[in-house]
Image (cartoon, rainbow, N blue to C red):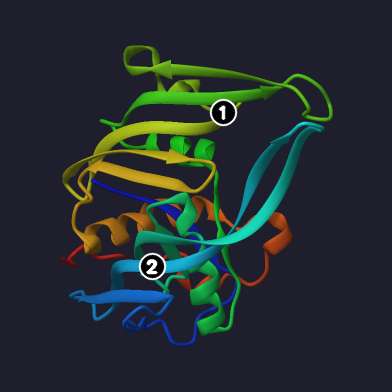
């Protein structure tokens, strides 16, 4: 099983290599392993640790009343990550791992931000696969013009169908299964950028190939961050042969 929160680089990355950086008690720390694939491309995966700014509310009770203060601090955080910067993406396995997007973006001279995924578009694409099924369909519908109120519906297992996606509701999460690259693939994709493979994505190379082939066509940066995402990655052939 492998799960990540997907982020995209706004610009093409000139040097897609990721070097590890490990020194005693030094942050950020990045442990990186390169996986070379048969098509000559390389993906990277590993672990990372850093320090992030935090706020903590402190409460004092006195005879005169209750006093609250906000204190600034630092917190040590850890994440697992995988990246194919040649294709312009990085994934981390925890929401508090998004500091790595800024760290790698600064190193590579570009903005790296959390992606949005068109789940309805992905679901429509899956309908072309004869054996594709949905086991979770989560949708929302706005109840007013300002989107201040929403109605959410969740269908599981036998009550979930690919045909339920689209229409007047926006699909925010889809649990899916189908045969991809002649192997059973089962996972979840969410509008928020979360992509998980429970079956069929244990190896880093296979998971990266799935992201490149199946997810990137439906992924984009939020509108406020959009720029040149690199047209070179569109329509490229992908080989799943990494470890």
Residue at the spot x=34%, y=83% of the render? Answer: 21
- Which of discs 2 and 1 lies nearer the camera? The answer is 2
Give percent across and percent down for residue 228. 63, 72
- Helix, strand or loop at label 2? It is strand
Image quadrant holding the N terminus, namely top left
Give residue 16's quadrant in the image: bottom left
Residue 146 higher or lower than 55, as above or below: above
Residue 61 higher or lower than 53, as above or below: above
Q: Is residue 162 visible?
A: no
Residue, far bottom: 15
- Which badge, 2 or 1, is on the more N-terminal residue? 2
Residue at mark 2 to residue at mark 1: CA–CA distance: 39 Å
Residue, far top: 159
Closer to the camera in the image, 210 or 150: 150
Residue 130 higher or lower than 206, as above or below: above
Residue carrying label 1: 166
Left or right of 115, for residue 85: left
Residue carrying label 2: 49
Q: How many marks?
A: 2
Closer to the camera in the image, 81 or 234: 81
Closer to the camera in the image, 83 or 53: 53
Left or right of 210, for residue 165: right
Bin the neighbour count of mark 1 within 10 Å (Cα to Cα): few under 14, some 14-19, many 20 and up.
some
Give percent across and percent down for residue 193. 50, 48
């Amino acid at each position: 099983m492998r799960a990540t929160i997907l982020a995209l680089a706004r610009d093409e990355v000139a040097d897609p290599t990721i070097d590890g950086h490990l020194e005693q008690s030094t942050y950020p720390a990045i442990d990186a392993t390169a996986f070379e694939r048969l098509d000559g491309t390389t993906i990277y995966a590993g672990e990372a640790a850093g320090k992030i700014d935090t706020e903590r509310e402190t409460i004092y009770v006195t005879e005169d009343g209750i006093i609250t203060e906000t204190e600034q601090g630092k917190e040590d955080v850890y994440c697992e990550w995988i990246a194919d910067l040649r294709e312009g993406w990085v994934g981390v396995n925890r929401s508090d791992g998004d500091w790595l997007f800024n760290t790698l973006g600064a190193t590579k001279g570009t903005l790296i931000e959390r992606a949005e995924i068109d789940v309805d578009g992905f679901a429509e694409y899956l309908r072309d696969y004869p054996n594709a099924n949905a086991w979770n369909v989560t949708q929302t519908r706005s109840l007013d013009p300002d989107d201040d109120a929403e109605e959410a519906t969740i269908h599981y297992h036998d009550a979930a169908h690919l045909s339920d996606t689209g229409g007047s509701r926006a699909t925010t999460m889809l649990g899916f299964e189908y045969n991809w690259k002649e192997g059973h693939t089962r996972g979840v994709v969410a509008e928020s950028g979360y992509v998980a493979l429970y079956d069929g994505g244990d190896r880093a190379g296979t998971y990266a190939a799935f992201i490149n082939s199946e997810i990137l066509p439906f992924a984009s940066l939020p509108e406020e961050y959009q720029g040149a995402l690199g047209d070179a990655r569109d329509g490229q052939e992908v080989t799943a042969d990494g470890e």
